[in-house]
Structures are given as C-alpha cells and as structure tokens.
Image (cartoon, rainbow, N blue to C red):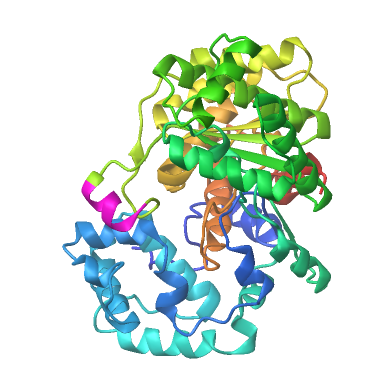
Amino acid sequence: MKPFMTEDFLLQTETSRKLYFDYAAKMPIFDYHCHLPPAQIAEDKQFDNLTQIWLYGDHYKWRAMRTNGIDERYITGNASDWEKFQNWAKTVPYTLRNPLYHWTHLELQRYFGISKFLAPDTAKDIYDKCSEMLRSPDFSVRGLMRKMNVKIVCTTDDPVDSLEHHKKIKSDGFEIKVLPTFRPDKGMAIENVAAFNQWVDALEKSSGIDVKNYKTYIDAIRSRHNFFHSIGCRISDHGLETAYAEDYTRSEITAIFDKLRSGKQATNEETLKFKSAMMFEFALMDYEKGWTQQLHFGALRNNNTRLMKTLGADTGFDSIGDFEIARPLAKFLDRLDTDNKLPKTILYNLNPRDNELMATMCGNFQDGSVAGKMQFGSGWWFLDQKDGMEKQINALSNLGLLSRFIGMLTDSRSFLSYPRHEYFRRILCNLLGSDVETGQLPNDIKLLGTMVENICFNNAQNYFDM
C-alpha cells in the first residue's frame, strides 16, 4: 500500500519519476490564461486569512459545499471567515476522488508546508498557521507567484478596461510579466439589449469614439484592440457556447446594430448573424497583429434561475453543454483560412465527447507557417482533473503532435492554484513513463525529457513570443 501524496504522487514508474524530477519540476510557469485580479497584483495584496484567498470566489469549492448540505450563509453569505473555513473543512473528507481533495492538499503542502489532512479536527490548527503565514511579507500575492516560479501571467480583461493595474505592475519593475488578454464577449452578447447598450456606452467613453453606427462600433473596438497591444497584450479570449458562422451581409449587420441601439430585441436569426460577424471581426484584428485567439466552447451557464438572481453569475451554477460545434467551427475557421487570415488559434472544449473533434479540427488548419499553429487546448474547467487531462493528452497524441502542445494553464481566480501546473506535469510524465515501461516509447530519457520541458514551458514561450 502506497502512502498518500508523497513526493512520488501520481508517478507510478521509475521512468515517470525521472522525467518529472529531472525535467518537469524545474521548469518555470507560463500561465497564459487565468482570471487573477490584476488590481491585487498591482497593490501586492496581503490576505488576512486562509478563507479570503482560498474560498472567496472559488465556485468549485462552493459547489462541493452545497452538495454536502452546507447552508449558503457559510458559502457566500455573511458568516465569519472562520465559520466558512470550518464548513469547508467539514466538506473536504467528503471530496474523496474529487480533484478538490488533491488540489486542497497539494496547495497546503506547496505553499504552507502542511502535510496534515484537512478535516474538522485539524481545521483550527491549519487555519491559524496558514493565516499567520499569509500575513507575512513573503506571502503577499507577488510573493506567492515568486514562490511558484511563475514567469508570465496573462489575465482576462474587458476591452473597456483602463489596464491601469497592468501599467502599475510594469512601472513597479515586478520581474514577473503580467499581461492583459482581450476578452470581448460583451461586444456580441446582444441577448440582453440593455446590458449590451451599456457596454457600448462604456466603449465610447474608453475609446473616445462616438459610436453612431456599426462601422464606428468596429472602429471603437479596434481602437481598444490597439491600446491593449500597446500594453503588451498578444492574446484574445472568447467564451462561447459554439462557433458562429451564419452567412450575412454588411448591410444586414448594420441594420441589426441600429435596431439594438434603438433598444429593440434582435430576432434569433439576427442574433446568430450578429455573433457571426463579430467573431469574424475579432479574428481579423487578431490576425493583423499576430495575436492568438482562444476559443472556449461548450459551457451552459447560469442554469439555476433562482440562485442566479440571488448570487449573480460565476457562482457555481454552470455545467457542460451539448451544442453542435463541428460544422459551424469548421465554417468559421475555413472562412478565415480562405483569405489566409486565420490567426494562431487555441480550441478548448468543455464536453469530453468533443476531444477527438477538436484534435482533428486543429489538423484541418495546420499550414506549416507556425509549429502547432492550431492548438487543442488543455483540459478546461470541469475537465482540468486527472481523467480529463489524460483524455485530452491521449486524443492529442493520437490525432496530432503532443510534442508541440503548449501545455497547462490555471484558468483560476486564486493565487493558490499554481500547483495545478504540477498536477498536470505529474500526469504527463506518468503517461510517458508508463509507455516507456511497456515498450510503447523508446527508453531515450534525453528525447523524452526535452519533450517534457517543451510542453511544460518552452512551447508556450515560443508560441506566444512574449
């Protein structure tokens, strides 16, 4: 019987251990997609206690606590931070075989040096020790990033954002690059006309352009795209149910935009056409500047109307969707490629049924101009756990080139999430090492070690060229 979560955690063979400890473990972190608040990095925030950094905003934990019968008061409500942590500690023993159990204990070990299991009887000691450490200078958010050997972080930012925090981080001389990512989802979210028009008003203000019609609307977005580029942004990100690739004419989109600005609701057909036009325009902007577009597909969001009204979005009521993706995605990518204006692209799926779909779709549009131009993104959201990562790696290995993969990201709002990179690296090394042990890969440690180093960091660094 093996002890739990020792240094050989997830590494089942000697070759796996060699690949991890000699190659993967030493590589720095390039976290090219996350939701860390840049304001907290700019101020080098110090958290008062473990609840604030661990439970505030973490809907993974919130979902588990609700499932365990914890009242909302102790999750997002007005209970004290200690009471919230107590109830998380009550929940942790029930998360066995859920990735939360692994993540929780990895984070306790890597940041705080604590190997105890979190449970009701250990909660107070762990809470007090971690909270005391978090109040020390070395455990500020910048200190935590240094501790995890982070080199580059790309946050997720609305086009109307001033990026003042990114400017301050750079002017402070912080040695870890913190760059913005252009996330224009609100620019095509026309289902809520009032919210869309509020965003267009904010776009007018931030761009300094009077948005009178669709042409000036695109001009204003391009102005913000240019501004983001000047601050170091080289990536866009798009959260989508599926790709949008309806046929449309410029005059149709102009009329739809005018209708929206008058406060009238677009029809379903008009909505699909408008989204299709915006996806195309965003991609053209990315191509013109040599950016990479990230396309996240398949989330069915805000399913619980009652709790959505009470708590708002991003509070734990999203799930995997079953949208048609292949045909519209192929049409969207082909339209760009036909004009030779397809930017580097990363495709992420939330439904595991789409793994092979995404891997083969990438292969359709590789053109030899850039190694791994089309990337099948790492296991995302509900799939960023052991089973999901293994399935993504296997699909990519079978249908593409794993050696050209740009690797893992946190997709997290928490400064304690960096061990997810370690989790991924251990899983990767275990798969490769197991294949060596069974004769499916050559026992060439230098060859495989170079591959591991590239997937962990070098491929991303070369791909994004930041």
Q: Nearer the viewer, residue 381 or 227?
A: 227
- 93 w.r.t. 111: above or below: above
Tell me: 72 left or right of 210: left
88 vs 112, left or right, is left
Q: Is residue 69 above or below residue 193?
A: below
Q: Residue at x 44, y 14 (%)?
A: 269
Q: Position of residue 283 (x, y in %)?
A: 69, 27
Q: Is residue 318 left or right of residue 334?
A: left
Q: Which residues are magenta?
A: 306-312
Image quadrant in which the N terminus is located:
bottom left
Residue 290, percent from left and from top? 81, 34
Q: Compared to 227, does 291 lie above or below?
A: above
> Camera-side residue: 334 or 309?
309
User: Could you say which quadrant of the image residue 362 lies in?
Assistant: top right
* Residue 331 vertical position relative to residue 260 in the rendered view, above or below: above
Q: Tell me which corner region of the image, top left, top right, bottom left or bottom right, holds residue 148.
A: bottom right
List x then y, in percent, for residue 101: 35, 62
Quadrant location of residue 264? Answer: top left
Whether residue 177 is visible here, answered yes or no, is yes
Q: How many marks?
A: 0
Residue 319 in the image, given as x and y percentages of width and height: 33, 40
Q: Main secondary structure of the magenta part?
A: helix
Pick the front one: 197 or 323: 197
The answer to whether residue 460 is magenta is no
Residue 150 visible in rendering: no
